[in-house]
Image (spheres, rainbow, N blue to C red):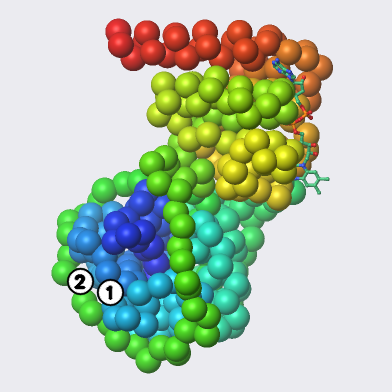
Amino acid sequence: MVLVFAEATNGKFKKAAHEAVTYAKKTAEVLGTDCCALTIGEVEDAGQLGVFGASKVLNVGGPGVAKFDSQVYTAAIAAAAKEVGAKVIVLSHNSTGKNLVGRLAARLLAGSAPGVNAVPTANGDQLTVRKAVFSGKAYADVTLTTEYKVISLAGNSIPVEESGAAVAVESFSPELPAAKTKVIETKRVEGTTPLPEAELVVSGGRGLKGPENWGVIEDLAEALGATTACSRPVADVGWRPHHEHVGQTGVAIRPNLYIAAGISGAIQHLAGVNNSKTIVVVNKDPEAPFFKAADYGVVGDLFEVLPKLTEAIKEHKAG
Ligand SMILES: Cc1cc2nc3c(=O)[nH]c(=O)nc-3n(C[C@H](O)[C@H](O)[C@H](O)COP(=O)(O)OP(=O)(O)OC[C@H]3O[C@@H](n4cnc5c(N)ncnc54)[C@H](O)[C@@H]3O)c2cc1C
């Protein structure tokens, strides 16, 4: 059995959870077994995970798991793995998954592969997974040889597939430790798709000259239905909030489209964005390093180029 932890936010699944279940189902097929999904906390319609390939869905509920706590969640996932006899555990490689992958591997004495991006291959009990290394400049094929294997799936790596039908949800009540930390407040950015899950991203750098000019980025993002991002110095000086900062020390993203305006393309910035499927760069300096990583480049003043792009997109959508 392959166990997948399908995370829900405010009771609802996001795309990352559907991707993880799809991936777990495909991994189970490779191993000739089934896939069980685990949900934690109050979740609407958890049985729908069957549509994405789970043959069984467990739910751990109750006040002890009402707020995320990595130790408690680790205990719940490990207990579920033992309960269903799963030796392979799949998580999403988002902030929750990154928090859990090492803890879970330590608890189960498992080999772990964080941030995988392709369906594994199997050789007996061994599983070979592919992941990006050296800031996305190369891939490594990693073979996990331990009895338990913990894998987290990078977002937007595989398409979501509907391969089954809804199943009944079974309640699972393992013994869980009390949380050692107390969550006082959770603040979520509402309204836009969070960067790790965004398929379209429009990003600005120091070339914007100041926070008062961000309208050109926001207008383009709105026309596309995209999420906004920025380079690190922009967040450091407070032009934009820190959660928008992408790169080596910020959020690593893999959208289908990344539009970068007024960003030079320093190696530390590229480290977080060069797994994007299509990169469009707008920069007035033809020698800007970002052009080497771009699929499409516009040499020009972003204050002229972006409004024209926004208008063209609006016209295209209207037509
Ligand atoms: C340890 C470490 C970690 C780091 N981590 C990160 C990270 O995670 N993310 C990150 O982004 N950076 C990171 N950095 C910083 C990184 O090295 C760069 O300094 C930073 O990415 C540069 O930001 P920028 O491209 O916005 O600014 P700049 O390098 O100043 O580039 C601005 C660009 O805008 C262009 N421009 C100016 N005016 C216009 C205009 N009107 N129209 C079009 N183009 C224009 C310029 O030609 C230039 O290419 C890190 C650095 C270190 C040392």
**Quick one: label 1 or label 2, which is nearer the N terminus?**
1
In-front residue for pair 97/239: 239
Q: Quadrant of the C terminus?
A: top left
Identity, as a three-letter code, of the amino acid under mark 1: Leu
- Give the x, y percent position of residue 240: 61, 38
Q: Can residue 11 be seen in this view?
A: yes
Q: Is residue 35 left or right of residue 195?
A: left
Residue drawn at (59%, 69%), measured in percent from left and top?
112
Pointer 1: residues within 10 angstroms few (<14), some, or many (20+)? Answer: many
- The type of residue carrying mark 2 is Val
Number of callouts: 2
Q: Give the quarter the ligand 1 occupies.
A: top right
Q: Is mark 1 within 8 Å of ligand 1?
A: no
Q: Is mark 1 on a helix, strand or loop?
A: strand
Q: Compared to 35, does 211 lie above or below?
A: above
Residue 34 in the image: x percent, y percent? Answer: 32, 68
Quadrant of image for the N terminus: bottom left
Residue 113 percent coordinates (x, y): 59, 64
Ligand 1 closer than 8 Å to label 2 CB: no
Residue at the image position 60 percent from the left and 80 percent from the top: 106
Q: Whole-Å distance between the Cαs marked 1 and 2?
A: 6 Å
Q: Is residue 84 visible?
A: no
Q: Do the residues labelled 1 and 2 touch (CB within 8 Å)?
A: yes
**Mark 2 sits on what residue?**
169
Q: Which mark is on residue 14?
A: none
**Mark 2: few/some/many CA within 10 Å (<14, 14-19, 20+):** some
Q: Which of 215 and 109 is in front in this view?
A: 215
With respect to residue 243, does 72 lie above or below?
Answer: below
Residue at 43% across, 26% down: 222
Q: Tell me the residue that label 1 is attached to.
A: 58
